[in-house]
Image: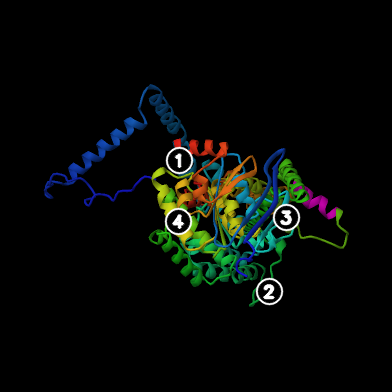
């Protein structure tokens, strides 16, 4: 164990006294330029290949950026405009988005009630963000607060979306679509798949042969089929196999397919983490008199979860994007509503704009997830690395 | 009455196999209350397996272990119950790296003994004080030296108020300069009257603290004697060779 020495009392080595009136802006500017030049030499022109690569990239940018700028800004058309004007100008038709963005975000939800899904999504997003602050989780009071807030908040969210209480008009679930549907599919899917994956991963390590075989078979089966076939089976095959008087809501069928599919992938990530925990940790927990569940929940899984943050978030991100596959069973998630917007007769023939719009939404959410993952890794990454 | 007090641990005909390999080939052993036992022997002699069987971490294949008159057996479901009365200190410390030193010590008392947070905290600080490491209570284990970690591991085991302490080569993974600080804690513990089974090659500790030294080879106890006899006029050639080997390093 290396000894850590306190830093010297003075943070930096003594420098020559610098008269304040001489240290004017020109001097700072020069050092800044020098520093940038040094950076450029080291990173852009450090040898012939590096220089060639830099020049190629610059050429590529010169070729693409002006065209992109022309399309997105210079030749673009804002409202008020119609499709004819857009076609004439040739650039991006932002007027179309200005006309259809609410329909893309909220789908067939009644336009007069759009504030409800908007409020619900914002409320949900702020709750998620608040729950992801590690400082809140670190304190028992914070944990209690979060656990106390979530159940009523979920009820409020359902009440907002569905209505029928507090004077809100009822909006049936078949009218839910766009961003709220994507958020529900992804968050419910990820949450339940995560819980199921813990059970599957532990089951796969179980000493009971039946449990182990069932878990292995399940994981291999789910990983062996494409998600699309699962969705199609859930939406077409499942209703055929059930008695005629039993119906499962289409949303639930899709949701179930997501949970079952991604649980298998997450279970393998958890298993990888479980295998990396030294045997001594199990032995120590057992020797202290902890039961199987106590050692798992208090000793083993906390270390496993810290270890597998990157691979878990990777699966979360792909799960979030893959909710768009419900388009094959005609559900109007964000991709579904964007596609519906392209068949709007007023804006017939425009594809890029709505898809650019939803791509931006997906990009923002996924970047936020990956940023948060790096934050967690920095905070917890080193713990668990030692025996 | 006192002479007839039954031993704390009674082992009869204990056997353990790993596949075809017989790690324990019939062990008979009594450990009296308050007795300090040192178990030694060449590597592969079954010492560690004996320790792991004594608290049921490894289920045994044949024979019986009675702990305070109760059979200790995984299949009877008593091993889990009795384990909380048996403290174990491992060769590689096995502290929980995601918890602070203090949390390492309070976890099991809170979960297993259902102590209140204050009571578990008080007991943890008391034992950390005892091993001389209370000032590190808020640190993570990986911030401590090996010797400090092992002392925390001893404190962690003591927080369960065990009636028997098992030490499985507690100093083997330590740098030489840290061995003493751990042995000092163990000697203090031995003097306090704790029943101890120490698997160790530290013959200095055996001389200073043991009531009896048990020598194992090939899964059997081949000799046992108080330290003065064991180190004095040793006739058994295997033990003489062993003692010569460990003193030359």
**Residue at which label 4 appears:** B187
For the residue labelled by badge 1, is the local secondary structure a helix, a strand or a loop? Answer: helix
Residue A301 placed where, x, y %?
59, 54
Label 1–label 3 contact, CB within 8 A: no
**Residue at which label 1 appears:** A69
Please check whether the numbered discs 3 and 2 fall on a single chain: yes
The one nearer the camera, A383 or B102, is B102
**Residue at which label 3 appears:** A256
Please check whether the numbered discs 4 and 3 fall on a single chain: no
Q: Residues within 10 Å of mark 2 (few under 14, many from 20)?
A: few
Give the chain of mark 2.
A
Dot in front, 3 or 2: 3
> Which region of the structure is painted magenta?
A230-240
Question: Which of disc 2 and disc 3 is earlier in sequence?
Answer: 2
The one nearer the camera, A42 or B81, is B81
Residue B171 placed where, x, y %?
47, 47
The one nearer the camera, A24 or A179, is A24
Label drawn at residue A164: 2
Residue A105 placed where, x, y %?
60, 57
For the residue labelled by badge 2, is the local secondary structure a helix, a strand or a loop? Answer: loop
């Amino acid at each position: 164990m290396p000894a850590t020495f306190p830093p010297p009392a003075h943070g930096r080595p003594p420098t020559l006294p610098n008269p304040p009136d001489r240290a004017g802006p020109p001097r700072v500017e020069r050092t800044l330029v020098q520093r940038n030049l040094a950076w450029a030499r080291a990173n852009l022109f450090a040898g012939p290949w590096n220089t060639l690569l830099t020049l190629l990239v610059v050429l590529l940018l010169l070729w693409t950026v002006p065209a992109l700028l022309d399309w997105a800004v210079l030749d673009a058309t804002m409202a008020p405009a119609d499709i004819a004007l857009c076609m004439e100008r040739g650039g991006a038709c932002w007027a179309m988005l200005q006309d259809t963005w609410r329909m893309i975000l909220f789908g067939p939800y009644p336009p007069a009630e759009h504030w409800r899904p908007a409020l619900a999504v914002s409320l949900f997003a702020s709750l998620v963000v608040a729950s992801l602050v590690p400082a809140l989780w670190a304190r028992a009071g914070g944990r209690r607060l979060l656990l106390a807030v979530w159940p009523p908040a979920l009820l409020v969210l359902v009440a907002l979306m569905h209505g029928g209480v507090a004077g809100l008009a009822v909006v049936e679930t078949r009218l839910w679509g766009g961003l709220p549907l994507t958020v529900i599919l992804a968050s419910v899917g990820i949450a339940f798949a995560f819980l199921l994956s813990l059970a599957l991963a532990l089951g796969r390590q179980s000493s009971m042969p039946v449990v182990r075989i069932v878990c292995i078979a399940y994981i291999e089966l789910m990983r062996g089929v494409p998600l699309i076939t699962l969705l199609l089976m859930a939406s077409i095959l499942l209703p055929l196999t059930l008695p005629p008087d039993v119906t499962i809501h289409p949303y639930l069928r899709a949701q179930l397919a997501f949970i079952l599919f991604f649980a298998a992938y997450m279970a393998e990530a958890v298993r990888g983490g479980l295998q990396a925990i030294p045997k001594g940790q199990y032995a120590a927990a057992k020797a202290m008199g902890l039961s199987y569940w106590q050692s798992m929940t208090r000793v083993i899984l906390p270390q496993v979860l810290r270890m597998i943050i990157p691979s878990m978030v990777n699966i979360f991100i792909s799960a979030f994007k893959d909710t768009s596959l419900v388009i094959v069973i005609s559900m109007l998630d964000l991709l579904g509503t964007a596609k519906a917007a392209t068949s709007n007769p007023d804006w017939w023939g425009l594809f890029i704009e709505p898809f650019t719009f939803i791509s931006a939404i997906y990009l923002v959410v996924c970047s936020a997830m990956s940023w948060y993952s790096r934050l967690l890794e920095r905070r917890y990454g080193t713990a668990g690395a030692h025996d | 009455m006192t002479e007839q007090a039954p031993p704390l641990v009674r082992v009869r005909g204990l056997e353990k196999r790993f596949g075809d390999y017989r790690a324990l080939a019939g062990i008979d052993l009594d450990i009296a209350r308050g007795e300090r036992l040192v178990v030694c022997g060449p590597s592969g002699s079954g010492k560690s397996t004996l320790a792991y069987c004594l608290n049921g971490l490894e289920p045994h294949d044949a024979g019986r272990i009675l702990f305070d008159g109760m059979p200790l057996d995984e299949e009877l479901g008593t091993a889990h119950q009795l384990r909380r009365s048996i403290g174990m200190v491992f060769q590689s410390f096995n502290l929980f790296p995601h918890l602070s030193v203090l949390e390492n010590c309070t976890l099991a008392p809170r979960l297993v003994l259902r102590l209140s947070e204050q009571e578990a905290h008080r007991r943890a600080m008391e034992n950390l004080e005892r091993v001389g490491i209370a000032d590190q209570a808020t640190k993570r284990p990986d911030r401590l030296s090996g010797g400090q970690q092992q002392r925390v591991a001893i404190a962690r085991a003591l927080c369960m108020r065990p009636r028997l302490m098992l030490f499985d080569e507690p100093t083997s993974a330590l740098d030489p300069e840290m061995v003493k600080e751990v042995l000092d804690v163990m000697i203090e513990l031995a003097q306090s009257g704790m029943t101890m089974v120490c698997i160790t090659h530290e013959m200095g500790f055996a001389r200073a603290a043991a009531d009896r030294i048990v020598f194992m080879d090939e899964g059997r106890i081949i000799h046992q004697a108080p330290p003065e006899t064991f180190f004095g006029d040793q006739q058994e050639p295997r033990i003489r060779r062993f003692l010569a080997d460990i003193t030359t390093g």
